[in-house]
Amino acid sequence: MAGLLLRIVVAVAAVAFAGCRPAGLPRYHVSGSVTFDGTSVPAGTVSFVPLGGGSDSQPYGFCEIKAGRYASRTGKSPGSGRYRAIVVGGDGVPYQTKIADVIEDHPHGKALFPTYVVEVDVPPRHGGVFDFAVLREAP
């Protein structure tokens, strides 16, 4: 669970830093579907983290998963280069946890699968579409 939380924090930090980049950098619209064992993932995120550590010429990308689909928005799309795509999928039923006096929101619901990570090239050769098919691991 701690590993998942760390990955979510990294994804949120990527979004925060994406807004700090100079305007006018080339970014590429990405979109696609996210399934788990053949079923659409109700909610979650897809983050594109540059393998080169990020720079002004290779910005981070971030997308929300809604009803099994995601699409980047202006200013949130990745730049050109090799990226690590980090997919976090939830059941779509938001909930909160409370530890001591700290309340933590979980807007995407309970995790459906461990964080899924795959390397991709942006811009893709197939029109900006990355479909992520996450499979349940055998017991």
Image (cartoon, rainbow, N blue to C red):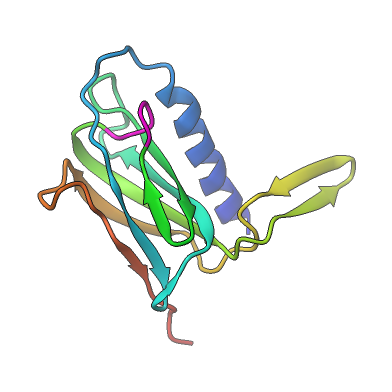
Q: Residue at x 52, y 54 (%)?
A: 44
Assess whether residue 77 is covered by the magenta stretch.
Answer: yes
Q: Residue at x 20, y 46 (%)?
A: 128
Q: How many marks?
A: 0
When the figure is inspected, residue 116 is found, relative to residue 63, above or below; the finding is below
When the figure is inspected, residue 74 is found, relative to residue 8, above or below; the finding is above
Which residue of the protein is positioned furthest toward the top in this rendering? 22
Q: Residue at x 56, y 54 (%)?
A: 3
Q: Nearer the viewer, residue 6 or 81?
A: 81
Query: Residue 9, located in which quarter of the rendered image?
Result: top right
Q: Residue at x 28, y 44 (%)?
A: 30
Which residue of the protein is positioned furthest toward the left in this rendering? 125
When the figure is inspected, residue 105 is found, relative to residue 15, above or below; the finding is below
Q: Nearer the viewer, residue 10 or 72?
A: 72
- Tell me residue 98's x, y (percent): 84, 49
Where does the N terminus fall, quadrant-wise? bottom right
- Tell me residue 16's x, y (percent): 50, 26
- Tell me residue 136's x, y (percent): 44, 78
Q: Determine whether, in the image, residue 111 is placed left or right of residue 58.
A: right
Q: Determine whether, in the image, residue 18 is placed left or right of residue 91.
A: left
Q: Determine whether, in the image, residue 127 is placed left or right of residue 137.
A: left
Magenta residues span: 73-78
Q: Nearer the viewer, residue 103 or 3?
A: 103
Assess whether residue 133 is covered by the magenta stretch.
Answer: no
- Tell me residue 117's x, y (percent): 37, 57
Overall secondary structure of the magenta stretch? Answer: loop
